[in-house]
Image (cartoon, rainbow, N blue to C red):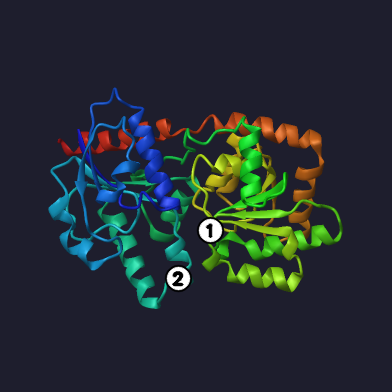
Amino acid sequence: MNIALDIRMINYSGIGTYVRGLLEGFSALADEDVSLYLLGNEPQVPRVPSKLCCEYRCLSLPIYSFREHLFYPRTVPQVVCLHHPHYHCPVSYRGRLVVTIHDLNHFLFPEYLPTHLHHIVAKWILKRSIRRASRIITVSEYIKGQLVEYLHTEAEKIDVIPNAVSEELRPCDDQERVVQFQKKHQLPAQYLLTVGINKPHKNYEFLLRVMAHCWQSKAVELPLVFCGISERSRANLVATIESLNIGPRVIFLPYVAHPELALVYAGATALVFPSLYEGFGLPLLEAMKMGVPIAASKRPPMPEVAGDAAVWFDPTDMDEAGAAIQRVVGDQTLRMSLIKQGRERAQTFSWEKSARATLDVYKHIQNTSGV
């Protein structure tokens, strides 16, 4: 069974994490009779797992460009299907298609795109990709429901295959490494942690207001660390911090790759995740695997990911969010329970499982198309 997989976004954070994880999972399935044709740029070759037997095709077509829409088919070999890890599929490709749709951000939040024209184009390509796809993979039941509700996608056409956490991410037993990392980045020994890029739906300004109240009342003393926000994208947060006069209690870390991310989680007393909208919520899964208790927004799909391994709060209610953070920090019995449940739940997710389920999608297409 020959499959083409577009990996041009392998170095990205969100979709790149998915691509890297899927390749990690495929590399563990050596018993499967599958030949992968990886479509990517030459500098991306080192990111492909060495255990993965595949053919690499260089695809020097920038993502989101007119060139990819015009010339993409010339680079795709004869395969059962092409798997595109993002809804923005080249419109000129005519073969069988599997598309992974992680969320409907660009459909529901047009303000995230540079212009109204970008929104119109993104919406058109999303709808076309859904119509053209032989199968659609989503990462949560919540996004499947949104596809059915907002885009009238046939539910039978959608496969829910959750994300997972790389095997590279594991608790660090070397305390000296942890201490050196904290010194290097001027981190305290313990802190509250939130992980992710800065976009309005991440709700970070709300979190800063909640924390300002907690610090003022002395209900919580721990500082807050943001991990994954570049300096150029934090202007609104810096303004909020200055207006609340909480600068000394807030620390920014840039994007941290595996396995150093384990060193970030090592100092976390709790993960705080106030998001208003997610396709999955990978930091929840990371925290559970790392033994870090969670206080999180109860908007879907977050409870779908963490279940009983978190204290949930309304991400628009400051009092409720503050109380949840205080409980996770101060209630030792609760903390131990959350850590135990989180580690058990994290074990039910793996990239090998997700990769096997993805192979089943490919096989379904092969069997139904008579290839």
State the residue position of label 2: 110
Query: Does 236 appear above or below 327?
Result: below
Number of residue marks: 2
Q: Position of residue 262 (x, y in %)?
A: 57, 39
Q: Is residue 87 above or below residue 57?
A: below
Do residues under tags 1 and 2 come within 8 Å of each other at their CB atoms?
no
Question: Along the horizontal axis of the image, is 296 left or right of 261?
Answer: right
Q: Is residue 11 left or right of residue 109?
A: left
Residue positioned 79% across, 49% down in the render: 326
- Check disc 2 and give the amino acid type: Pro
Res 6 seen here: yes
Q: Can residue 305 be seen?
A: no
Q: Nearer the viewer, residue 210 or 152?
A: 210
Circle 1 crowding by C-alpha within 10 Å: few under 14, some 14–19, many from 20: some
Asked where in the image residue 81 lies, by quadrant, the reply is top left
Q: Position of residue 6 (x, y in %)?
A: 28, 48
Asked whether, in this view, residue 283 is left or right of residue 111, the answer is right
* Label 1, label 2: how far apart the Cα atoms are: 18 Å
Amino acid found under the numbered disc labelled 1: Ile
Q: Quadrant of residue 357?
A: top left
In the foreground, 335 or 135: 335
Q: Name the residue carrying label 1.
A: 197
Q: Quadrant of the C terminus?
A: top left
